[in-house]
Amino acid sequence: MTDEKIDQQGTKLARRQILEPGESSAWHIDPYHRLSVIIRGSELKIEYRDGAEDHLTPSPGEAGWDAPTDRMHRAVNVGVDTYEEVTLFLLDRPTSIPQPTS
């Protein structure tokens, strides 16, 4: 998994995340509002620590706002293509961690 900070202006943080087929993100929560833009990829599974799952079929160019959640989860690229997204996080302070792992 590639997780790259693109830029930060105060409490606004832009990040690029790339998951190759079979790769997953770290287990995390999402305490901040964020806007995600899909760059490439076709199939993603969201696994929750409580055992639930969501299956997503994103399309390049698709964008959407996500609300904060304290539900522990991770993203898994279950497709055959590389998955890439750029996310803009709206943090409460410049030093906040956008997706804490605990």
Image (cartoon, helix red, strand yellow):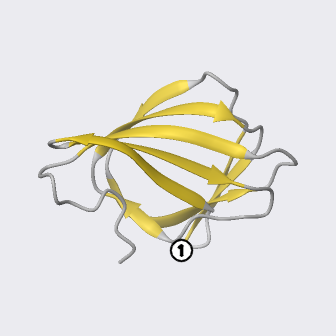
Residue sitting at x 13%, y 49%: 92
The amino acid type found where label 1 is placed reads: Arg
- For this view, does 68 lie left or right of residue 10? right
Q: Say if 76 sits above or below 12 in the image.
A: below
Residue sitting at x 63%, y 51%: 18
Q: Is residue 13 visible?
A: no
- For this view, does 101 lie left or right of residue 31? right
Task: Give the residue number, with chain letter if any, for mark 1.
Answer: 49
The total of numbered circles placed on residues is 1
Identify the image quadrant of the N terminus: bottom right
Q: Residue furthest top?
A: 61
Residue 87 position in % (x across, y down): 44, 39
- For this view, does 90 lie left or right of residue 38? left
Residue sitting at x 44%, y 67%: 28
Q: Residue furthest bottom?
A: 102
Q: In terms of secondary structure, where does tag 1 sit?
A: loop
Identify the image quadrant of the C terminus: bottom left
- For this view, does 100 lie left or right of residue 18? left
Residue sitting at x 61%, y 72%: 51
Between 62 and 13, the residue placed more toward the observer is: 13
Say which quarter of the image contains residue 2: bottom right
Q: Is residue 16 visible?
A: yes
Residue 93 position in % (x across, y down): 11, 52
Say which quarter of the image contains residue 10: top left
Residue 39 position in % (x across, y down): 63, 31
Residue 62 position in % (x across, y down): 59, 24
Between 90 and 3, the residue placed more toward the observer is: 3
